[in-house]
Amino acid sequence: KAKAGGRNQVCFFDPSLQAEVNSRTSLLRDLRAAVELDQLRLLYQPVVDRARRVLGVEALVRWQHPERGLVSPAAFIPLAEQSGIILQIGEWVLDTACAQLSAWADDPVRKAWTIAVNVCARQFNEATFVATVEAALARAGANPAHLRLEITESMLQSDLDSTITKMRQLNDRGVRFSLDDFGTGYSSLSYLKLLPLDQFKIDKSFVDDILNNRKDLAVAKTILGLASNLGLGVVAEGVESAAQYELLATYGCEAFQGYLFCKPVPVEALPRQSSI
Ligand code: C2E
Ligand code: MG
Ligand code: MG
Ligand code: MG
């Protein structure tokens, strides 16, 4: 017979829901230890120009979990952001990327490459964000002009003044900013002109069907036109076919990233030559 537990007892009757809660709880526990246990990995994906010369790479984090295997950021970044663990993870990513930049300073090909690091709202909104980035650059002795930070439109929703101040402080030191997944959020065009941005990244969702869907093509063309009018560069993300690459190039896109050129790979597997 059913017996009432304590007044405040929470009961889960749905076993799949219970399983999900258990899995989330254990994931969170493991995630708290991931940085200390050295379980994070950075993969790098090249960004190329029209002539397929490598301009730089984007750093994409993975979690090498002892039982779950290689966990994708989609599966843990949201949890890391809610719990605040993203602050430690973000610092590890910045440190690792900056150390990589300084290791490449003597490489004849890679010394010219930039590394783009993804930053989420929770990190950016910390009062210490600028100091954290500066400290990572200083620890590694990396050139700030080779670091790019990828922010998203969601970051532009709260406290625009302090966002602009932080971006200007870092930009004054040489750090550049890209607006990632552009077109999927809620950017106000009046905000965009105020920000010291260097580049838009056309979201993969507009590239996927660009050959068949006139609306996706229209969005891509509009982003390219806006960038050109604002004096910004554009990277198209998720380019998987030569036809997508050629079409985007026809409309003035100057930088590309996607499986057509290279998947995200460990540093050892990055191309050695300057074009791919
Ligand atoms: P994003 O910054 O928009 O990164 C692009 C995503 O598209 C990456 O997924 C990349 O692997 C994938 N991609 C690139 N080219 C292709 C392609 O041709 N085809 C397909 N199917 N996919 C492609 P990934 O590595 O799973 O990262 C997902 C998201 O996780 C990133 O989206 C970024 O928002 C976030 N993320 C990754 N690393 C970090 C990090 O260090 N910090 C933070 N805060 N977020 C991160
Ligand atoms: Mg990105
Ligand atoms: Mg993106
Ligand atoms: Mg994306």
Image (cartoon, rainbow, N blue to C red):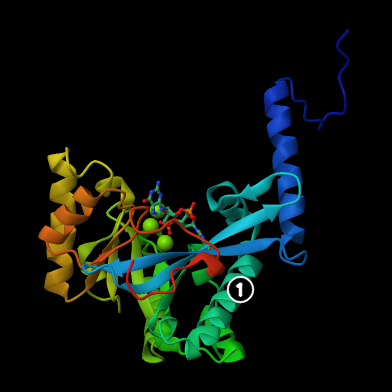
Which is more toward the observer, 74 or 63? 63
| Quadrant assignment for ligand 3 | bottom left
Labels in figure, total: 1
- Mark 1 highlights which residue? 91
Question: Would you say the beta carbon of the disc 1 residue lies within 8 angstroms of ligand 1?
Answer: no
- The vertical placement of 4 against 48, above or below, is above
Q: Is residue 179 left or right of residue 133?
A: left
Q: Is residue 80 left or right of residue 227?
A: right
Q: Residue at x 28, y 44 (%)?
A: 208
**Location of residue 159 by image quarter:** bottom left
> Can residue 128 be spotted in the picture?
no
**Location of residue 96 by image quarter:** bottom right
Q: Residue at x 73, y 66 (%)?
A: 38
- Quadrant of the snapshot with the C terminus: bottom left
Which is more toward the observer, 31 or 237? 237
Q: Position of residue 261 (x, y in %)?
A: 34, 58
Q: Residue at x 68, y 55 (%)?
A: 64
Q: Position of residue 252 (x, y in %)?
A: 13, 64
> Can residue 31 be spotted in the picture?
yes
Which is more toward the observer, 238 or 127? 238
Q: Is residue 236 left or right of residue 219?
A: right
Q: Position of residue 143 (x, y in %)?
A: 46, 90
- The vertical placement of 149 against 188, above or below, is below
Q: Residue furthest top?
A: 1
Q: Secondary structure at mark 1?
A: helix
- Quadrant of the snapshot with the N terminus: top right
Mark 1 residue type: Glu
Q: Residue furthest front?
A: 273
Q: Residue at x 87, y 24 (%)?
A: 5
Which is more toward the observer, 165 or 22? 22
Give the crowd class for mark 1: few <14, some 14-19, many >=20 residues within 10 Å: some
Q: Position of residue 228 (x, y in %)?
A: 14, 70
